[in-house]
Amino acid sequence: MTSLERVLTAFAHQEPDCVPRWCGASPEFLAKAQCQLNLPDQESLLVRFGDDFRRVFARYAGPEFPLVPGATSRTPFGVQRAGQGYGQPLNHPLAEATLQQIHDYPWPDSNWQDVSGIRDEALAWNRQYAMLGGDWSPFWHDVIDLLGMENLYFKMYDEPGLLDAVLQHVVDYYAAVSQRIFDTAADALDIFFIGNDFGSQTGPLLSPAQFDRFILPHLARLIDLGHAYQLPVQLHCCGGFEPLIPAMIAAGLDGLHAIQPCCRGMDLATLKARYGDRILLNGAIDSHHVLIAGTPVSVREHTREVLRIMAPGGAYIAGASHDYILEETPVENVLAMFDAVADFGVYE
């Protein structure tokens, strides 16, 4: 099978020739691994890992906005951020806004994203890999940035209509960007990949009732958008969000990434038994304790055990339990993980 065939077979809840492999990693880790393995480019590194996916992005082509002193980046919604990685918001511009001020806010224009090169970029891999596309659409995180997290929770009770308005404007933007991407390149893409973290180490960040009331309609809107272009939809979601999974499945979500077994409620055998016939599960190889702190031998054995639980019946993609393999992760441990998937993930 090609990588594309392997992945689509897994999404169809059938067993491919072997378990597909997923490599989500930070740029710092990829640069370190490429150097340590003496490989000429990042593509050679992904081939060495056996990654069955490639990803294409729109490019920002909108107006340039000045950064305030100390800021290192700015979101499309006007939130200035600073700190390690993506940093933390320096301001919450809608924290005290009225409903009218929310509607009058300078929301971004989807035309600021240049989608013209996506189709050619995707087709450059000759349909060998599963192509991830569409806008990442982290609308939950953006609303937290715009309102402030504690303030957001208060507004669920005090001003639910105001929160609805913010969510609507944010998701309007993301849906419009992805629709432009799909209008241009849907025939060259295979999976609509979006991301919102609804879980913490100890459980969901919202109750199921809050999730159903405020988040699910917007998540369903994005799922429906992907399905309208015949694309399965995969959600990246960190943490212990098991109580929210039934609603995600009911909304039509096709895949969940990246399953974190060290979080509350995320026992792998339970997830596989409870949901494995209804949604694809991606990840599950512990990047928190095993990949970072283990040895190649312990990583190999851990990976073998995860495959024993998750692989039967298909609908599983093997990878680290977080989308960003961090720079401090030993390269030899990541090699041990992917090589173990190649060795132990072969179907009869």
Image (cartoon, rainbow, N blue to C red):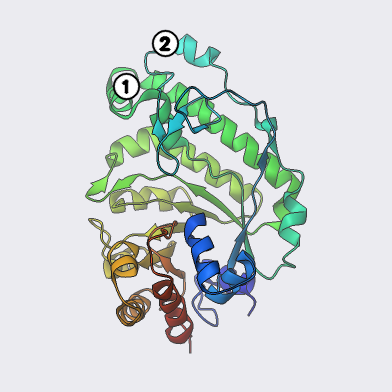
In the foreground, 39 or 271: 39
Please name the residue shown 57% across and 70% down the image.
45
Name the N-terminal-most of marks 2 and 1: 2
* Image location of residue 182, percent across then percent down: 69, 46
Disc ID at residue 155: 1
In the foreground, 34 or 211: 34
Judging from the image, what secondary structure is the residue with disc 1 in?
Answer: helix
* Image location of residue 122, percent across then percent down: 71, 58
Q: Is residue 77 above or below residue 262?
A: above
In the foreground, 64 or 102: 64
- The residue that disc 2 covers is 98
Q: Is residue 114 left or right of residue 206?
A: right
The amino acid type found where label 2 is placed reads: Thr
Count of marks placed on residues: 2
Q: Is residue 6 left or right of residue 85?
A: right
Residues at discs 2 and 1 in contact (Cβ within 8 Å): no
Q: Is residue 238 left or right of residue 317?
A: left
* Image location of residue 43, percent across then percent down: 63, 67
The amino acid type found where label 1 is placed reads: Lys
Whether residue 254 is visible to the viewer of this picture, yes or no, is no
Say which quarter of the image contains residue 115.
Answer: top right
Judging from the image, what secondary structure is the residue with disc 2 in?
Answer: loop
Whether residue 142 is visible to the viewer of this picture, yes or no, is yes
Disc ID at residue 245: none
Crowd band around label 2 with a 10 angstrom C-alpha radius: few (<14), some (14–19), many (20+): few
Quarter of the figure with the N terminus: bottom right
Gap in Å between the C-alphas at discs 2 and 1?
Answer: 12 Å
